[in-house]
């Protein structure tokens, strides 16, 4: 059993990350077609992809220019996380408006 966990620790997460984008893109396609998700929340879900792209770019930049991980450079890490906070905020406000409408 310990060998299995050691194997997982050495596993490169890159391919798994790329594979995880496909279900999310399918979700975005469905969310765009349905009227169940408010437009503001959908925009928040879409902005999550921008957060992912910014995080990847900032990670590469941090590694190439500084030789460090993104989490070690506060300005870059905070800037990337700001996109996540923005997308999460849009999702929350989008669904809260839906809850307000259903309460009326």
Image (spheres, grey):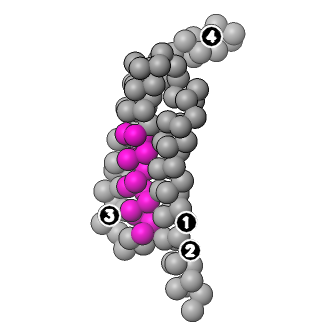
Label 3 and label 4: CA atoms lie apart by: 41 Å
Q: Name the residue located 52 percent from the left edge and 19 percent from the top edge.
A: 68
Q: Name the residue located 41 percent from the left edge and 20 percent from the top edge.
A: 65
Residue located beneath label 3 in the image: 32
Q: Secondary structure at mark 4?
A: helix
Residue located beneath label 1 in the image: 92
Q: Secondary structure at mark 3?
A: helix
Q: Secondary structure at mark 1?
A: helix
Q: Earlier in the sequence, mark 3 or mark 4?
A: 4
Part of the protein shown in magenta: 40-54
CB atoms of marks 3 and 2 within 8 Å: no
Q: Earlier in the sequence, mark 1 or mark 4?
A: 4
Residue located beneath label 4 in the image: 6
Residues packed near mark 3 inside 10 Å, few (<14), some (14 to 19) or many (20 plus):
some
Label 3 and label 2: CA atoms lie apart by: 18 Å
Q: Percent x, y for residue 44?
A: 44, 60
């Amino acid at each position: 059993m310990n060998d299995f966990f050691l194997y997982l620790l050495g596993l490169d997460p890159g391919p798994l990350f790329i594979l995880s984008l496909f279900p999310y893109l399918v979700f975005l396609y469905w969310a765009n077609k349905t009227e169940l998700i408010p437009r503001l929340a959908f925009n928040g879900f879409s902005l999550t992809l921008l957060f992912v792209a910014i995080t990847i770019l900032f990670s590469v930049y941090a590694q190439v220019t500084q030789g460090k991980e993104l989490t070690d450079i506060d300005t870059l890490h905070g800037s990337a996380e700001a996109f996540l906070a923005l997308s999460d905020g849009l999702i929350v406000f989008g669904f809260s408006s839906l809850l307000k409408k259903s309460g009326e």
